[in-house]
Image (tube, rainbow, N blue to C red):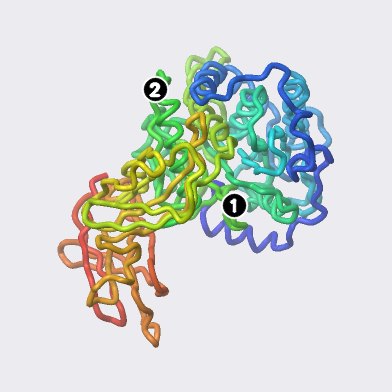
Amino acid sequence: MKYLLLSFLLISVQWLVAQTNMLSTSSVAEQVVLGSYSGSDYLPATPTPVWPEVIAADLQAAISPDSLKAYILKLASFKTRNSGSDTVSATEGFGAARRWAYQKFAEISAANDGRLIPSYLQFDLDICGVGQHRNIFAVLPGSVPGSGVVLVEGHMDSRCDILCDVTCLAEGVEDNATGTALVLESARILSKYQFPNTIVFLITTAEEQGLLGADAFATYAMQKNIPLRAVLNNDVIGGVLCGQTSSPPSCPGLDHVDSTSVRLFSAGGFNSKHKQLARFIKLEYQENMLPLAEVPMNVRIMSPEDRTGRGGDHIPFREKGYPAMRFTSANEHGDASNGPGYSDRQHTSEDILGADTNNDGAVDSFFVDFQYLSRNALINSHALAMAARNVALPPTFSATRTGSQLNLFWNSPIDTHTIRVALRSLTNDWDTVYTISPGLQTELTCNPTGPVYVSVAGVDAWGVESLFSAEKLVQTSDTETPEDQADASNYKLFQNRPNPFDEATWISFWVNELPAVNPKASIQIFDLQGKLIQEIQVSLKQGLNEVLYTHGYGVRGTFSYVLQIGGKAVDARQMVFAN
């Protein structure tokens, strides 16, 4: 979503009433996501090998920048896709757009033996004067009913400055015809396969009015006990030009071009299943798709859940406990503030395909890079294919550590071919991902200083890993958790991470035991001259405590951060920014 925090708060007040009368217009689609069907009824007529290298090569060949362009041109032709716009016209407004998207899913199904099942998720809620709304989704049934569901989404609604202006030209090309096109293309290229898990391709409405369409589907999934294992949201995903304004973490400045980076936003730091999903996506790309890529992509795992003061359709899913993350272009054309002097395209009538620089009536300078969008569609599609394999996790584990030596111990017998062990220290990324044979290797090498975060994944017979487990924190001692340390201090401040990487960094500290009276606690940030830059209040809890410090784009230099407990400095460290 592309509005500032104040706008979000105002919108939240405006639509406090929850969606009601939610229903899938296709009983077949609903039965599939509930796991009530036979997988053999949806076998491909021509089975395709499911080896990772075969799928990777097939996806690389199948993705079509021309298809993505055609989808975007059609979406722009509806003039506006505001959630409160016309639902009767055959050519303009959200109603015409959603019927077209539904028809595209139906055409993809017809080309794949009827195996993709389109539906609407209908719900009642007064949004911009319209009382009933519909998300569009399509279901690709898995071979193992009830084993799990993975979902890719993008919102289709658009807007101008005024939230419910249903008459302005709001083609919404970057925001978010690009995400809608990506979902359609992913459906087209994945529908030839059958995976163990079911895949849902979701196009939402009313994102701009407060994530309302996504919230409706997330609520529907929760009420129906749909086993969602991963949610991939795509929003502002095809543009390559930086605007004069953009919400941090931001791009360098006006007209900067980046067609080889993509940002992955997700909530949390330590032991976040949302960050773990983002890391899984990046790992799958690096190990399987990057060797085939003509243009390598820099997949950047960002510290915050979204840009500062902003939000997107992954958030309602995260709020309901589902692993969820967001893809966004490296460069974004504006912060949607739309105030005096605002000249960027986001949330204006200028969010269009491109410019006619020679006045011949044809666009010759594109704001969207279709090759770039196709690379992002490829990353999404491949991650969905791998996650939908539904590989089992290995048994739970414990760990001990002495310096750079890490030992793992499994709490029950291993029944998987191999195991992957991911180690992380000072960045959002894994430092190392080991592949080990059960019982043959339990001693690994890790970062000799500071905390190490360990998670594991199972691996199937074809070499595909599961989504990774929760992280365990292993300190520089012979124990798995810091509370057993012979440490005189009740508090331990850790090195920030990442340091540097994007425009925010996680600062964490450990509390062995909570005091009888919980004192005031904070993290204070100082420059080298001793000037207090920021103080972040913390509610203490036993164990690991984390705060996210947003330092801003282009900050350079050395800073100190101090853990204050009850008005006293108990620990301090330095951090260096060079971005």
Asked if 16 appears above or below 37 in the picture, the reply is below
Asked if 62 appears above or below 96 in the picture, the reply is above
- Residue nearest the viewer, comparing 185 with 77: 185
Question: Which amino acid, by three-letter code, is at mark 2?
Answer: Pro
What kind of element bears circle 1? loop
Q: Is residue 178 left or right of residue 287?
A: right
Q: Position of residue 10 (x, y in %)?
A: 61, 61
The residue that mark 2 highlights is: 291
Q: Position of residue 62 (x, y in %)?
A: 57, 18
Viewer can see residue 266: no
Q: Residues within 10 Å of mark 2 (few under 14, many from 20)?
A: few
Residue depicted at x 69% and y 41%:
82
Q: Is residue 568 left or right of residue 29?
A: left
Sequence-wise, the earlier of marks 1 and 2 is: 2
Q: Are marks 1 and 2 in contact (CB under 8 Å)?
A: no
The residue that mark 1 highlights is: 322
Tell me where residue 77 sits by quadrant: top right
Mark number, residue 445: none
Question: Which amino acid, by three-letter code, is at mark 1?
Answer: Tyr
Q: Residues within 10 Å of mark 1 (few under 14, many from 20)?
A: many
What kind of element bears circle 2? helix
